[in-house]
Image (cartoon, grey):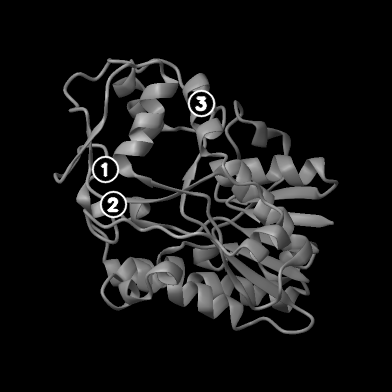
Amino acid sequence: MKTLIVGGTGMIGGHAAALLTSQGHEVVLGARKPARPETPMANYPVLIGDYSKGAFSPQELGEFDAVVFAAGSDIRHLPKSADRDEFWRVMQIEGVPDFVERAKKGGVKRVVQIGSYYHQVMPHLAETDDYVRARKLADEGARALADDDFNVSTLNPPSIVGVLPGVPAVRYETLVGWARGERPEIPDYGPAGGTNYMSVKSLTEAISGALNTAESGKAYLIGDQNLHFNEFFQMIFDAAGSDRTVEEHDAEHPLLPDAFIVPGRGTVLSYDPPADEVAQLGYSRNDVWRAVREIVSLVGPTK
């Protein structure tokens, strides 16, 4: 199967490329610029383009049997000076379905979109949060194009845990440096609340499963382990060999500001993905601790 991974030079796309290649896919990466030479993705052919600006024509996409869309912007990508409504319109609400429509016109048979979990777990958030609303409309708009000859599915994952050599991981570098005692100005607590976490390995397994078995037009809520934020931080401390305890305080934290806690500080967003869908997609669970240990082993000391 010849497969295009849009967002293929990023952390999720890079992991997906490696797994799909090992399974016999002929993988091409779609990205706005070439892969960094120090990353594993530098070994793949790259189709240059920006989906949000109409790149990737039906003719270009028609060269592929399947497309994995892993390029959707989230709140971390929102520029401070941006017009929020316009940004979400271009990057999500219209940008994603327009791209999927070009894939359909080109004759692509299968599209797997990587979305986000908020609107499936807490639907009310789409009424009050512009980011969640944008994700919801992008998801629904893409899947509305599905038919018997065009299989479109969405995977809606939680917070993804993982790194890839050569790909910047400033957040994890800071977290690991904090755990190792290199950031004494950061207090040892996590903000109140929590969420579901999933390793990038499990996510890429779900991507592979969706390319083979997903029901056309369906959104799959995927995930792994429910943790309070301080429990996740504690995993990093433990993996780094620290004997310090990360407590939970109902206060904003410098490494997880309130703006990035979409349901609101103090909320625990927890769920278990449907067991039949986990089996259908064939992804592993209980993999977060392994992923955290891998991150700590790969992230060097903070400078």
Q: Position of residue 142 (x, y in %)?
A: 57, 76
At x 72%, y 62%, the residue is: 280
- Residue 256: give its label: 1
Amino acid at circle 2: Phe
**C-alpha separation, residue under disc 1 versus residue under disc 3:** 20 Å
Q: Amino acid at mark 1?
A: Leu
Residue type highlighted by circle 3: Arg
> Is residue 56 something that shows in the picture?
no
In space, the residues marked 2 and 1 are separated at their CA atoms by 6 Å
Residue 130 pos. (x, y %): 30, 70
Task: Give the vertical position of 277 relative to 199 (above or below).
Answer: below
Label 3 SS: helix
Q: Residues within 10 Å of mark 1 (few under 14, many from 20)?
A: some
Side (left or right) of 202 relative to 301: right
Is 296 on the left-hand or right-hand side of 174? right
Write down the residue under mark 2: 260
The image's mark for residue 293 is 3
Q: Are marks 2 and 1 in contact (CB under 8 Å)?
A: yes
* Residue 134 appears in the rendering: yes
Residue at (66% x, 31% y) in the render: 40
Give left or right: position of 290 versus 45: left
Residue 301 position, x and y percent, is 39, 15
- Asked whether, in this view, residue 63 is left or right of residue 80, the answer is right
Q: Nearer the viewer, mark 2 or mark 3?
A: 3
- Vertical placement of 44 versus 131: above or below? above
